[in-house]
Image: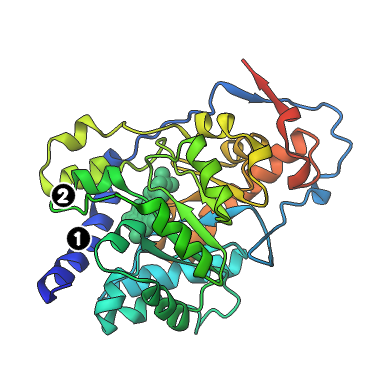
Amino acid sequence: MSESNSNSLNKRKLEHIQACMDDSVDLQRDSFASLKLRYNAFPELALDEVSTETDFAGHRIAAPLIISSMTGGIGPEFNTINRNLAAAAEHLNVPLGLGSMKVMLRHKEAEASYRVRDSFPGLKLIANLGLVSFNYGLTYDDMQRIMDIVRPDAFGLHLNALQEVIQRGGDTNFKGLLERLEDLVRRCPLPVFVKECGGGIAPDLVHRLAEMGVAYVDVSGNDGTSWASVEGQIGGNEMGELFKDFGLSPRWILENIDSKRLGSTRIVASGGMRDGIQAAKAIALGASYVATARPFLIAGVESPEAAVRVGQRMISELRTAMFLTGSSNIANLDRHVLIKS
Ligand SMILES: Cc1cc2nc3c(=O)[nH]c(=O)nc-3n(C[C@H](O)[C@H](O)[C@H](O)COP(=O)(O)O)c2cc1C
C-alpha cells in the first residue's frame, strides 16, 4: 500500500466515525418486533438467581454481549475511543472487537490505538481485518504480526461487499474468498470470528462457514448501521441511498439457520441490536451472543462510563426478559419462550 493510500485509509476511518454519529445512517429497525416473548406468570425464579454468564474463547464472560469491531488508526481520536471501549469491556467483562487493523500493518504509529491489552490485561479481545484485503496483498503473515502485537483471543475477518461497492475506490474483487478463508482458518491458532458489516450472511453460507471450522459467525444483518448509507454520504455516491436497505434481516437469518449443521460453531446476532428484549429473542432463536456497534461508538466517544452504561442497560434488560420468561440461564433461553404473532 502506498503512503497516500494509507493516509486516505486513516482519513476515511475518521470520516466513518463522524458519519456514524448521525442517526441518518442507522436503519433503526427491529425485525424481531412481531415476535413475542412468552411471559411466565410463575417464573419459579428469584431475579437475583438469573445468570447471564456464558463463555467466549475459553473465558467466562458476564453476558452474551460483544462490543462490535469499530475503529483504530493514527491519532488521538482513535486512541481515546479504543481505550474508553476497552475500559468498559473490561469492567463489564464482555468481549471487545477492535476495528480493522490494515492501517497498523503499514504504519507503526497506528499500533498505539490497538495496544489496549497492555493497560487492560483482563480483556477478551477480537482482532479484525477485511477478508477482501487478502485479494489485495495481505497474507497469513500479516495475521501473525497482529497476533504478536495485539495478543487477541479470537481473530475477526470481516465481509463487506455492500460497503466496498458503494465506497469510492472500494476493493471489489471478492473472487475465491471462501477458499482463502478456509486456508486462513486452517493456519490460525486462534478461534476465527467471521462477520459481516450490516449486510447479513445467508443461512447456507453460515452452514458452509461452520463446515470449514469457523468458530464464531456474526451474521450482522440489516436492522442497524447501513454501510451503504455511510459510504454513500462520504463519497457522494447516490447509490448509497438506493442500497441503504439492501441485505438480510438478522431475524430471517437466525430463523433459517439449521442448528444441526453448526457443529461447534457459535452464532452471533448483530446489526441493529439495541436492547435486551431484542437480545433475548435473538438468543432464543439460536444465537449464542449479540453484538452491538454504533451505540457503543457514540458512548465511547464520550467516556468509558458512558460505554459501561450502554452495556449495563442491555445486560439488565436481558436479565429482566430472562426472569419474565422463567429462564434461569442463557442455555434455558430457547425457542420455547417465543410466540409468533
Ligand atoms: C464507526 C464504525 C466503524 C466500523 N468499522 C468496522 C471495522 O473496522 N471492521 C468491522 O468488521 N466492522 C466495522 N464496523 C461494523 C460493525 O462492527 C457492525 O457490524 C455494524 O455497524 C452493524 O452493527 P450496528 O447496527 O450495531 O452498528 C464499524 C461500525 C462502526 C459504527
Left or right: where 30 falls relative to 162: right
The residue at the far right in this view is 44
Above-or-below relation of 49 to 57:
above
Residue under pointer 2: 234
Which of 310 and 6 lies nearest the eye of the viewer? 6
x and y percent of residue 284 in the render? Answer: 67, 36
Residue found at x 13% / y 50% = 168
x and y percent of residue 91 in the render? Answer: 59, 68
| Quarter assignment of residue 58 | bottom right
Q: Which mark is residue 12?
A: 1
Above-or-below relation of 320 to 213:
above
Mark earlier in primary sequence (1, 2): 1
Quadrant of the snapshot with the C terminus: top right
Residue found at x 64% / y 24% = 36
- Residue 299 visible in image: no
- Residue 141 visible in image: yes
Q: Secondary structure at mark 2?
A: helix
Left or right: where 266 falls relative to 96: right
Which of 281 and 167 lies nearest the eye of the viewer? 167
Quadrant of the snapshot with the N terminus: bottom left
The residue at the far top in this view is 341
Above-or-below relation of 283 to 159:
above
Type of amino acid at the residue the image marks with label 1: Arg
Left or right: where 55 falls relative to 290: right
Q: Which mark is residue 70?
A: none
Residue found at x 25% / y 55% = 16
Type of amino acid at the residue the image marks with label 2: Ile
Q: Are marks 1 and 2 in contact (CB under 8 Å)?
A: yes
| Quarter assignment of residue 83 | bottom left
Per the model, the C-alpha gap separating discs 1 and 2 is: 8 Å
